[in-house]
């Protein structure tokens, strides 16, 4: 199982993971990303870094789960994570939809009140 | 019922420039009983035609929504207004002139006599006046069947927007009212919250001008969306076992 991934590729992966991590942290510190959403991205970067350093990690986990072709595990996990996150975004979207509706109604009712007095 | 009954007539308007003034004049010229005080309240749902300027230039009382909320959100605004301003009853009336103001007292009567919390004006009890298209009638029969199955309430015209709500019903809909195509779904909401629903026959007219909110190509989406809305609302209310408050 030694040297399944060339070192050059491993270094590239680490660098990309670090850049991604830096990017996420910058967004948080600048206040452009709320902490509640940053959580999932931090986990993503940690996972990216973990598998960049832990060279046999993917193979070991694939074997543990009985996955024959290890790289397909990446796609499975990634698609699952994406779908989960999309559902989360839909929930957020629905909540904001209701909040915007309530705000618009309040505004309209206040305008009406203001014109009456 | 004592003394004066304050009635807010809520008229949601989206691009109804041809109908607004006619409807307003018709409401004002209709003679109601002594003990009924009718206040029309137009809800301008961000119309993109001249609806707004017609409302302003004719001094018609209206509520101006800053963004387009769709029929459900617009009607709910009116319900909230009626609730907060001490109206006894809110009547929803379509802005397109389908619902004649002369029929208003018919749908107020069951509330006036404290026999009902929600009254729905129906065109299908006695087959008088405008009866609408075949496709719509099929849809209406489907919703009638769905309501009977779920809540054992028979509403012949569940898509009718000509309805009266007393204060108890208003308190409910101020908290939650469906967004799109709210009428059939609202019946489930009322009956699962133990409100008394009555249907009275009214004569309706063909829309006087403008566009219906339900276009033919949207019918399938409409049926699907409303069915889904009804089923989920039913599950949510039935198995939570408490009043619906979101």
Image (spheres, rainbow, N blue to C red):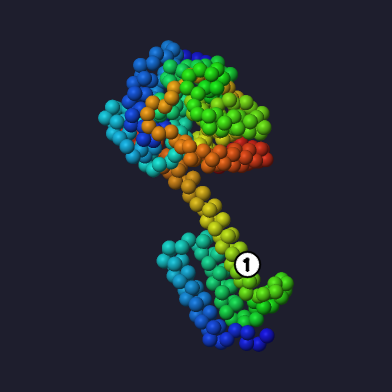
Residue drawn at (43%, 28%) of the image? B94
Q: Is mark 1 on a helix, strand or loop?
A: helix
Is residue B66 depicted above or below A61 in this figure?
A: above
Residue B228 x, y percent position in the rendering: 59, 42
Is residue B154 depicted above or below A78 in this figure?
A: above
Q: Is residue B54 left or right of residue B178?
A: left
Name the chain under label 1.
Answer: A
Q: Is residue B108 visible?
A: no
Where's the C terminus of chain B, which quadrant? top right
Residue B72 x, y percent position in the rendering: 48, 37
Within the image, what quadrant is residue B138 found in?
top right
Q: Residue furthest front?
A: B134
The residue to which callout 1 is attached is A76
Residue drawn at (47%, 31%) of the image? B79
Residue B124 x, y percent position in the rendering: 55, 22
Q: Pointer 1: residues within 10 angstroms few (<14), some, or many (20+)? A: few
Q: Which residue lies furthest to the top in this view?
A: B34
Residue A88 x, y percent position in the rendering: 55, 56
Within the image, what quadrant is residue B200 found in?
top right
Mark count: 1
Residue A114 vs residue A14, the one in the foreground: A14
Q: Can residue B243 be seen in this view?
A: yes
Residue B136 vs residue B34, the one in the foreground: B136
Residue B176 vs residue B159, the one in the foreground: B159
Residue drawn at (59%, 59%) of the image? A84
Residue drawn at (41%, 66%) of the image? A30
């Amino acid at each position: 199982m030694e040297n399944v991934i060339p070192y050059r590729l491993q270094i590239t992966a680490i660098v990309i993971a670090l850049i991604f991590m830096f990017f996420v942290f910058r967004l948080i510190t600048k206040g452009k990303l709320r902490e509640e959403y940053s959580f999932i991205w931090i986990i993503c970067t940690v996972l990216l870094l973990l598998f960049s350093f832990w060279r046999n990690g993917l193979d070991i986990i694939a074997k543990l789960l009985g996955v024959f072709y290890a790289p397909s595990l990446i796609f499975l996990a990634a698609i699952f994570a994406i779908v989960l996150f999309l559902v989360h975004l839909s929930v957020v979207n629905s909540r904001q939809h209701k909040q915007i509706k309530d705000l618009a109604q309040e505004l309209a009712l206040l305008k009406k009140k203001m014109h009456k007095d | 019922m004592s003394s004066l009954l304050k009635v807010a007539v809520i008229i949601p308007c989206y691009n109804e420039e041809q109908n607004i003034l006619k409807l307003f004049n018709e409401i004002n010229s209709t003679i109601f009983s002594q003990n009924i005080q009718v206040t029309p309240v137009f809800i301008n749902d961000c119309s993109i035609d001249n609806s707004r300027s017609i409302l302003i230039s004719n001094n018609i009382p209206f509520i101006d929504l800053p963004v387009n909320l769709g029929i459900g959100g617009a009607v709910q605004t009116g319900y909230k207004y009626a609730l907060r301003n001490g109206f006894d009853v809110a009547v929803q009336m379509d802005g397109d002139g389908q619902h004649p103001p002369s029929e208003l007292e018919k749908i107020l009567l069951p509330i006036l006599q404290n026999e009902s919390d929600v009254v729905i004006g129906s065109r299908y009890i006695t087959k008088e006046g405008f009866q609408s298209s075949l496709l719509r009638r099929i849809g209406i029969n489907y919703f009638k069947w769905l309501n009977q199955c779920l809540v054992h309430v028979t509403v012949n015209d569940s898509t009718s927007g000509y309805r009266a709500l007393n204060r108890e019903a208003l308190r409910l809909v101020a908290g939650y009212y469906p967004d799109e195509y709210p009428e059939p779904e609202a019946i489930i909401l009322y009956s699962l919250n133990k409100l008394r629903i009555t249907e009275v026959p009214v004569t309706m007219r063909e829309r006087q001008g403008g566009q219906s909110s339900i276009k033919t190509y949207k019918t399938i989406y409409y049926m699907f969306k409303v069915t889904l809305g009804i089923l989920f609302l039913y599950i949510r209310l039935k198995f939570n076992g408490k009043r619906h408050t979101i």
